[in-house]
Image (spheres, rainbow, N blue to C red):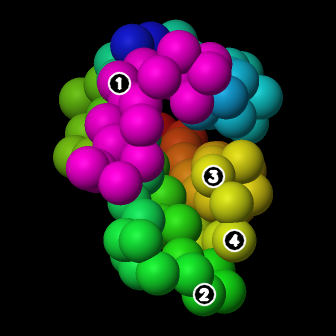
Amino acid sequence: MQIQVNTDNFIHGDERVIEVAELAVSNDLEHMSDRLTRVEVHLKDQNADKHGPDHILCTMEARPRGKGPLSAHHEAADIQAALKGAAKKLRTRLTSEFGKAANHH
């Protein structure tokens, strides 16, 4: 499973951000990594240089083998919370999707 991290102009996609993103993805999706080709992580600061609650938006998109992509979004006050929330939501969606596929066989 390949993990790709993208950030906007207001979030510096340095090694630490990439490390935290990869850890969040691994924690929630590692057990299904053999069923995923890639997970894309997009981090966006919605308020740019202004401050406000829940201004970090994390979108995660998983590419399951042989299926269309599934995504999840989460807004939070900081990058780590946004990553954790999106990963958890994506895990739930993937678990549901894989469960449906198993029931059809």
Q: Which residue is mark 3?
A: 79
Q: Nearer the viewer, mark 1 or mark 2?
A: 2
Mark 1 residue element = strand
Highlighted range, magenta: 3-19
Q: Which of marks 4 and 2 precedes in the sequence? A: 2
Instruction: Tell me how far mark 4 sits from mark 3, CA to CA.
Output: 7 Å
Task: Look at the image and tell me whether residue 70 can be seen.
Answer: no
Left or right for 67, reference 102:
left
Q: Residues within 10 Å of mark 3 (few under 14, many from 20)?
A: many
Q: Which of marks 3 and 1 precedes in the sequence? A: 1
Q: Are marks 2 and 3 in contact (CB under 8 Å)?
A: no
In the image, which disc is placed on residue 4? 1
Q: Are marks 1 and 3 in contact (CB under 8 Å)?
A: no
Q: Which residue is mark 4?
A: 77
In reply to whether residue 100 is colored magenta, the answer given is no
Residue drawn at 47 percent across, 81 percent down: 50
Vertical comparison of 70 with 25: above or below: below
Q: Hey, what amino acid is under mark 4?
A: Ala
